[in-house]
Image (spheres, rainbow, N blue to C red):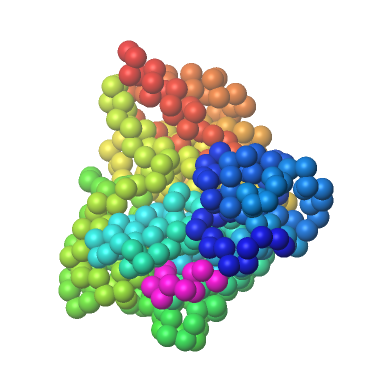
Amino acid sequence: MSGDPHAVVKNISIDTRTLMRDDYFLALKGKNFDGHDFIKLAIEKKVRGLIISLKVLNLDSSIPAFPTFPSIIKVKDTLKALGDISGAYRRKWKIPLVAITGSNGKTTTKEMLCSIMGLAGATLCSKGNLNNQVGVPLTLLNLGSKYNYAVIELGTSWPGEISRLSDIASPDIGIITNIGLTHLENFKGLEGVFEEKKVLIEKLPPGGTAIINADDPYLSRLNPAVECITFGFSEKAMIRAKNIRMWPDLPSFETDIGGEHLHVRLPVYGRFNIYNALAAAAAASRLGVKPELIVKGIENYSRPKWRMEKHQLVSGAVIINDSYNANPTSMRESIESIVQSFQDKEKIVVLGDMLELGEDSAAEHMKLGQFIGAQPLSRIILYGEQMKHAFEALKGTEAEAKHFLKKDEMAFEIRKHLNSDSVVLFKGSRGMELEEVVDSIVSKEEAM
């Protein structure tokens, strides 16, 4: 370590493209880059300090002479240092923090809750899906006296990540939306996913609150040591959706919160989004938000990109772009939502590979094929190497199904079936980039 030990750190940046004068530059090593390769550029931008690996040698040629040289802090692991710094900083601010995890719906739940809490006071929210060991610390470093609340999303790809992120974020309220088939290559089945996600609840402090899905068979096994609020559709749920309507309009439901009966109309399709709304409502109610603000926040939240995104085409056809990501659970939920929400339409599904399923991939795609073959769908269009297993499962059924490995050929096939009676769902893992097909179809129609 070198430099002034009393220097004030006003901002930490990991990206030299947005690095500002007097920032501290923390060099992270990623899959495709190493921040240590940009130390010289950081110095040229007149950073106040560097946080770098102990392994870095021979900095002398890059460091300017005294008195302009930056402070240098060397650590064993810069990623761990980022989390440790952020965690210590978070604990300086005694504001309520809600952490959200789950296999599906965590980003939408976060956006709904942020919309509600924004009506109650200044709220720091995770941007996009900055939910990992880089995104969560960087978000928390934005905390300050101007905020009344914080809502943070926690994701995981490896066992132990939720534990680490919980330690960094120190949440007062923890939400688990559900347990589904995600990242199976690393968690070895639903039990592994459950063991990872439940750590958020186990890490809550005395006086904390757990908010969990009462209808999830795994989460219903939890017996939290803290206050617990359950949500769902079943009678055992403390905050329960009743009188659910999926058609002919956008989803709506009724629920009782804080002794008041509420009617909520979602601005987005999907029965599963009612669960997300209930989870957000439960957390907001626990934080003392008035019921009327809860309804207003849910009904006016901004839907994340590529999540049940509706396009009305010139031909009269409707496209629902849910291509942000996919796993076996969310695939079924999205398909069911289209069936429920567009009962008077010819329903076409365009499905891309579900990635990161490891050795279970072929079997899960086969199961998906069996599922979609039993749905009232007009056409099934499958894309990707893994979807060939779903296509095999559809052989011998009455389903109108085709399998493609090229997007342009698939787009041509889809266009043949677009008319005023058709609704088309696009769903696939992020790596399949099905939004490219959506964009090509939408832009071509607009040009007509």
Magenta run includes residue 410 = no
Instruction: Please tell me whether residue 391 is drawn above or below residue 252 in the rendered image.
Output: above
Q: Is residue 59 left or right of residue 347?
A: right
Residue 105 appears in the rendering: no
User: Residue 377: x and y, percent?
Assistant: 42, 38
Instruction: Please tell me whether residue 94 is drawn above or below residue 10 in the rendered image.
Output: below
Residue at the location (64% across, 44% down)?
43
User: Residue 279: x and y, percent?
Assistant: 37, 66
Instruction: Please tell me whether residue 51 is drawn above or below residue 84 in the rendered image.
Output: above
Q: Is residue 306 left or right of residue 266?
A: right
Give the extent of the magenta segment: 88-98
Residue at the location (48% across, 42% down)?
324
User: Residue 404: x and y, percent?
Assistant: 59, 27
Q: Quadrant of residue 229?
A: bottom left
Residue at the location (40% across, 58% down)?
125
Q: Nearer the viewer, residue 246 or 87?
A: 87
Mark count? 0
User: Residue 74: x and y, percent?
Assistant: 72, 60
Q: Quadrant of residue 310?
A: top left
**In what quadrant of the picture does the C terminus appear?**
top left
Residue at the location (38% across, 43% down)?
308
**In what quadrant of the picture does the N terminus appear?**
bottom right
Residue 101 appears in the rendering: yes
